[in-house]
């Protein structure tokens, strides 16, 4: 049994899982006191689950990780208190348990290919559309990490507009700086549109909302094309809070990819999780139960 904590961009999800299935879950909004809220909420779930006892903790963060050191290296404006913090030591002090740490998109990909929307897939990419744009890749059954834990997860920071605005990562014209939820909210506020909710953007047909929506779809589509060109997957998994808009988001992304892929490239299947809120927790449970290399 595993205690899993997902430090997401807008909320922290906590779950106790047995064989990949959640026994108890809870969430708290992000903000001041994230570490304390995560610890206290997890402790409450543990108390409710007695006499069963988790044997390890899985922790996901929305940024680059140093797994060996148990630290988040950088997430740019997301959970600044986690930057450089020894999360393995934090878990041991808070719960008396060993821990593993992973990037949230990688954990979500593990969750979806283990027991989610693409079970058994060995070549897959995931793109999660939320506060930011997270990505991850699985190649021949191996989670792509790279020499310094940066590989596969920075797809949202591929330049899709050479003349775009400066992203908070330091690059110019990143997909996330155009179509992450934080960027969409910024642009909605600047335009002074009546629509202020990102999901409502895909339920509104006024000209301003339509233009912003089409720009976002092009950014997401270009990101997915880049992932397919780089990793040649059998399946593309689309997840994250923005996918609550359903086919209004997923269908045009898939159409964009099919139109813009290299002519001989395989046209992958597309899937959207039924319960995307569980993807990261399920993946963390798998990773926490697996000997780390």
Image (spheres, rainbow, N blue to C red):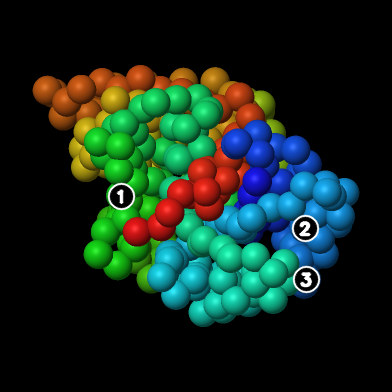
Residue 100 seen anywhere in this rendered image of the structure: yes
Marks 3 and 1 close (CB-CB < 8 Å):
no
* Residue ID at (43%, 66%): 67
Residue 16 position within the rendered picture, expressed as x and y whole percent measured from the top left: 71, 46
Which is more foreground, mark 3 or mark 2?
A: 2
> Where in the figure is residue 151, as x and y percent of width and height?
30, 56
How many C-alpha atoms fall within 10 Å of the one at disc 2: few (<14), some, or many (≥20)?
A: many
Circle nearer the N terminus (3, 1): 3
Residue 112 lies left or right of residue 24; in this view the side is: left
Instruction: Report, in whole angstroms, how far the alpha carbon at label 1 lies from the one at label 2.
Output: 29 Å
Give the residue number, with chain letter if any, for mark 3: 36
- Point out the frontmost of discs 1 and 2: 2
| Residue at image location 29% in from the left, 32% down from the top | 123
First reached walking from the N terminus: tag 1 or tag 2: 2
SS label for mark 1: loop
Q: Nearer the viewer, residue 75 or 58?
A: 58
Mark 1 sits on what residue? 144
Find the distance from the CA under tag 3 to the CA under tag 2. Answer: 10 Å
Dot 2 lies on which element?
Answer: helix
Q: Nearer the viewer, residue 250 or 95?
A: 95
Ranked by sequence position, the earlier of labels 3 and 2 is 3
Q: What residue is at 36 percent from the left and 27 percent from the top? A: 121
Q: CA distance from mark 3 to mark 1?
A: 32 Å
Q: Which residue is mark 2?
A: 42
């Amino acid at each position: 049994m595993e205690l899993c904590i997902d430090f997401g961009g807008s909320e922290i999800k906590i779950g106790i899982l047995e064989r990949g299935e959640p026994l108890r879950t809870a969430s708290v909004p992000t903000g001041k006191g994230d570490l304390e809220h995560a610890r206290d909420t997890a402790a409450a779930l543990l108390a409710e689950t007695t006499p069963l006892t988790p044997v390890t903790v899985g922790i996901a963060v929305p940024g680059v990780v140093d797994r060996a050191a148990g630290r988040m290296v950088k997430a740019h404006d997301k959970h600044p208190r986690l930057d450089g913090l020894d999360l393995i030591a934090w878990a041991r002090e808070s719960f008396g348990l060993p821990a593993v740490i992973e990037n949230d998109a990688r954990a979500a990909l593990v969750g979806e290919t283990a027991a989610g929307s693409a079970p058994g897939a060995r070549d897959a990419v995931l793109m999660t559309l939320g506060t930011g744009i997270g990505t991850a890749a699985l190649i021949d059954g191996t989670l792509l990490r790279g020499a310094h834990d940066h590989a596969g997860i920075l797809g949202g920071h591929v330049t899709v507009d050479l003349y775009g605005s400066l992203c908070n990562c330091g690059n110019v014209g990143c997909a996330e700086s155009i179509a992450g939820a934080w960027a969409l909210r910024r642009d909605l506020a600047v335009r002074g549109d009546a629509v202020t909710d990102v999901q409502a953007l895909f339920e509104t047909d006024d000209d301003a909302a339509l233009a912003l929506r089409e720009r976002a779809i092009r950014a997401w589509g270009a990101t997915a094309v880049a992932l397919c060109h780089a990793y040649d997957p059998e399946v593309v998994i689309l997840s994250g809070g923005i996918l609550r808009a359903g086919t209004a988001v997923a269908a045009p992304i898939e159409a964009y990819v099919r139109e813009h892929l290299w002519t001989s490239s395989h046209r992958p299947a597309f899937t959207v999780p039924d319960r995307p809120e569980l993807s990261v927790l399920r993946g963390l449970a798998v990773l926490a139960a697996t000997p780390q290399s």
